Amino acid sequence: MPPSLPLLLLWVSLWLLPVAAWPDEPCPPEPSAGAVATLVERIAEWDDAYYRRGEALVSDAIYDQARARLVRWQRCFPGRVAEPPRPSHPGGEAVHPVPQAGLTKLPDEAAVERWLSRRDDVWIQPKVDGVAVTLVYRRGELVRAISRGDGRRGQSWTERVKQLPGVPQRLAEAGDAILQGELYLRLEEHVQAVSGDAGARAGVSGLMARESLEADAAARIGLFVWDWPDGPPAMEARLEGLVRLGFAEARTHSLPVADMAEVKRFRERLLHSPRPFATDGVVLRQSSRPPGEVWQAEPPAWAVAWKHPAREALAEVRGVRFQVGRTGQITPLLELHPVALEGRTVRRVALGSLARWQERDIRPGDQVVIALAGLTIPRLQEVAWRAEERVAVPAPDPDDYHALSCLRLVAGCEGQFIARLTWLSGPRGLALPGVGPGTWRVLVEAGLVSGLLDWVALEPEALSRAHGIGPVRAQRLAEAFAEAAQAPFGQWLAALGVPPGAEAALPSSWAELAAITAEEWQRERGIGPERAAALVAFFAHPEMARLAERLARTGVEGFAVR
């Protein structure tokens, strides 16, 4: 029997209050009118594709981050930031008997804990990654299936859903029921932390968009019922009732939680244990909630989502700088406004090559999507959208940098010169203890090193004049530098950056190696014309000859040039 009007009003007053506002992030710098217009336009474009065509142009994580940015701007700069226009008739023509409400997404552990602190009898379940659907049963028979759409209206999926063996066409108990759930792509032993979303949502969306489904494709779609709006008011009774009706999966994957520790344990298990579906977080539900007739197509107060750590992040490019490596390769680095990604703060991402940057034409103000390669190295996924104003970015000329450029510190050479010194002291060079790029940068800034071997004869007194180098460290550095003279000839060659292949002619002296012609180098196994030319150029370079002479004067064996 439907509840009386006073009872309905009581439900409304108790349950349809907004979720308490969490402490706001500090306001960012005020965006330009162009930046606001571009963000609003982009979200409207994504909404239109999703609501009209069921097509997700970006991942949930990127959409959520863009929306969060818009909301923050609206809060910080009221009146300046409009809401993106809704697509006309976004949901479709089929009316949901009970609105399908999205969930408030809590940003972090602290927000989850605050939400829990105001409630008891809370249950947790996976936030299954698929496409939402409303199922309507009359006298036990499935009569309607409606896609989520805008929460009020959706597309009629009745005929397609009736082709799915994973959706009961008849309830185990005769009667009427309205169910809300997720159609998901069945996966074999899916571990979220390893495989991510595995394209699950796009996969099921694609299958549901087909005019007809083959039997094997239909069998790949499962159903997770996450609510029963006209069912029992208490969670445990609803879950048990769903089992009796033939929907056991929600009961299997739902648990009561008493505190934050239990929520975190469930979330960790969800990330690292095998499941038959992809997930994008957890859902927390208070056991009791109002009946479906008072629901709105707005996030309710009785349920929230806590998503998995984002595997992608939307970042704004602050600037572009170019790093020249030891061999002259130019690597563009995008400097980003810091973003959190899988528990890390990411401030920059490398593009790999100058040609890749030129092809992508990324400038300050552009919005990019980044992810972690192998869970450690940030990588560029794509350009989400471009800044309206295209700021000029001067790039180095690749003709100025090569394997034998910047052997001394001259204008425009600091990056490659320090990279050479870093290689020289590193594990594939002299393996100098406690000497890395920071050490070399300090010595260069102090004016103590402007050539590759200026450090060899530095005394502790001179070293201690460099910023941040005290007497003790200066003594250790001087000792490490003095010991380097004892390194063998082949190790010194590697430290100076000799091209691969020279080891084939060892043991030899510098003079002997410098006398080898390109044709003679090519007689060695694995040395072709290009490498042979590089070896000849290395030993013939005047600055390399001067370095060899200096090493010979220092007493390093094998470096006499005559």
Image (cartoon, grey):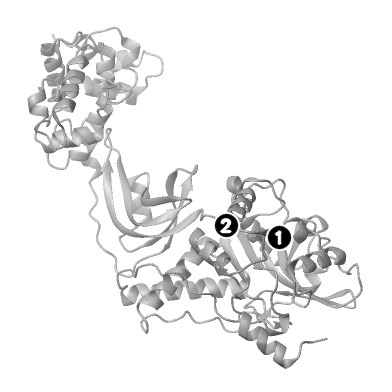
* Label 1 secondary element: strand
Relative to residue 361, is residue 20 depicted above or below? below
Which residue is painted at 18% across and 20% down in the image?
481
Going by the image, does 545 lie left or right of 390? left
Say few, some or many: other residues with alpha carbon within 10 Å of mark 2 (under 14 / 14 to 19 / 20 or more): some
Amino acid at circle 2: Met
Which residue is painted at 33% across and 26% down in the image?
530
> Where's residue 525, x and y in %?
40, 14
Disc number at residue 260? Answer: 2
Which residue is painted at 26% across and 36% down in the image?
328
Q: Nearer the viewer, mark 1 or mark 2?
A: 2
Mark pair 1, 2: CA separation: 28 Å
Disc number at residue 460? Answer: none
Quadrant containing the C terminus is top left
Residue situated in front as seen by the camera: 363 or 483: 483
> Where's residue 559, x and y in %?
18, 11
Disc number at residue 184? Answer: 1
Amino acid at circle 1: Tyr
> Where's residue 435, x and y in %?
24, 28
Instruction: State which quadrant residue 71 falls in.
Output: bottom left
Relative to residue 486, is residue 404 depicted above or below? below
Earlier in the chain: of badge 1 and badge 2, it is 1
Relative to residue 81, is residue 515 depicted above or below? above
Going by the image, does 515 lie left or right of 72? left
Going by the image, does 343 lie left or right of 91? left
Q: Residue lying at the far bottom in this picture: please name it.
A: 5
Going by the image, does 49 lie left or right of 225? left
